């Protein structure tokens, strides 16, 4: 057998193999990620049987951000004050401008907080709002908030989107007898997250899609003690007590804190695909309830603290699409180098 003839035929076979990858795909390629978090019927109940507790002030913050191939859009907003005297709205209580990255083929509306699931256009957008609030309504309404981040690529590029909402409530305790006070936080939540990649036409060389979601609560600044913090993980017992305070969790139905990603592409060395199609999802929700215990450290002792509630979500996508001809030439170049190396070895034998 003529080894040199065999080697000479190999580059052509490899080029045909690489080209066939493009020919075998009939759908448009996309790299998509989305995250939608809804918090409903949130209430904060303070029980102080051995003195008094008072809310001395509160503040809300929210932000949106979206970026597409270096061009960005975003907004942030704040409001607050005291119960009955604040600068927050009614419905929504606080809503930054929706973020639509320049160049997006899909434009999200100002009151749209739901995932579109669109994978046919390139876009990045985000929206968030504190829709209603206990404190701003004088305890007439429960607190509701929505956050959505979404991005998709059908061509080369990078895109990202993110949102945050945060509330801070200042509270003062005074104990006139031995004992403790409690702060119970309770709410419902749903989370829908998805990352998906489809190697269609044009075929992606390197793609990644990632989503994340986070929700947490804490009571801080209580002197001389601190009441600790809470994060969701889908398991009862996620509270983290600190100092003289404590936290007890009673319900945590579904993990709301998650960061996951998926990848796909084509090996430039072997001309073979991986992760086609590729997808991952985290969808669920339920009921959440936990209680902080406050002890200021003695009778006649006053302590002041802050109840903090924070929620966020984010998505990032990346896509690299080579020209079919350039990928074929790359495969030919690599194999030609291998042929030349082997031929030299034969000549030296």
Image (cartoon, rainbow, N blue to C red):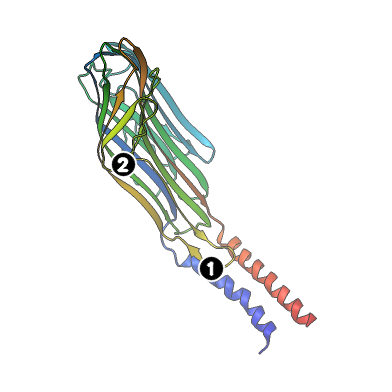
Whether residues under marks 1 and 2 lie with C-beta atoms below 8 angstroms apart, the answer is no
Left-right relation of 311 to 135? right
Give the residue pinned by disc 1: 19
Give the residue pinned by disc 2: 191
Q: Is residue 186 above or below residue 140?
A: below
* Of residues 101 and 160, the one drawn nearer to the viewer in this rendering: 160
**Residue at 30% from the left image edge and 12% from the top image edge:** 299
Tell me where residue 184 appears, x and y as whole percent.
26, 27
Tell me where residue 214 appears, x and y as whole percent.
38, 37
Q: Residue furthest left?
A: 140
* Residue 118 visible in the shown view: no
* Residue 224 visible in the shown view: yes
**Whole-Å distance between the Cαs marked 1 and 2?**
41 Å
**Residue at 32% from the left image edge and 20% from the top image edge:** 295
The first of marks 1 and 2 along the sequence is 1
Q: Dividing the image into 4 quarters, which one contains the C terminus?
A: bottom right
Helix, strand or loop under label 2: strand
């Amino acid at each position: 057998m003529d080894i040199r003839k065999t080697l000479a035929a190999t580059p052509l076979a490899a080029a045909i193999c690489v080209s066939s990858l493009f020919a075998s795909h009939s759908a448009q390629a996309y790299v998509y990620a989305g995250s939608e978090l809804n918090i409903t019927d949130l209430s904060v109940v303070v029980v102080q049987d051995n003195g008094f507790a008072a809310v001395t002030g509160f503040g809300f913050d929210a932000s949106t951000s979206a970026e597409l191939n270096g061009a960005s859009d975003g907004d942030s907003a704040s409001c607050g004050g005291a119960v009955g005297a604040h600068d927050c709205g009614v419905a929504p209580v606080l809503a930054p401008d929706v973020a639509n990255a320049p160049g997006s083929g899909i434009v999200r509306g100002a009151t749209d907080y739901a995932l579109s699931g669109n994978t046919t256009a390139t876009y990045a957008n985000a929206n968030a709002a504190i829709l209603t609030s206990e404190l701003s309504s004088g305890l007439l309404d429960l607190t509701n908030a929505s956050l959505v981040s979404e991005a998709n690529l059908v061509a080369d590029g990078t895109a990202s989107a993110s949102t945050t909402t945060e509330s801070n409530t200042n509270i003062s305790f005074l104990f006139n007898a031995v004992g403790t006070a409690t702060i119970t936080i309770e709410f419902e939540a749903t989370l829908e997250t998805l990352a998906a990649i489809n190697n269609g036409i044009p075929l992606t060389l390197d793609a990644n899609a990632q989503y994340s979601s986070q929700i947490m609560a804490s009571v801080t600044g209580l002197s001389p003690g601190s009441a600790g913090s809470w994060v969701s993980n889908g398991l009862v017992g996620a509270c983290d007590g600190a100092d003289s305070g404590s936290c007890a969790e009673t319900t945590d139905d579904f993990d709301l804190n998650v960061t996951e990603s998926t990848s796909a592409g084509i090996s430039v060395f072997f001309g073979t695909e991986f992760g086609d199609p590729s997808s991952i999802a985290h969808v669920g929700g339920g009921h959440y309830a936990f209680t902080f215990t406050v002890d200021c450290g003695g009778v006649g002792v006053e302590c002041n603290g802050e109840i903090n509630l924070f929620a966020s979500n984010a998505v990032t996508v990346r896509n690299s699409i080579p020209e079919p001809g350039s990928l074929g030439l790359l495969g030919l170049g690599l194999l030609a180098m291998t042929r030349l190396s082997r031929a030299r070895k034969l000549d030296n034998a």
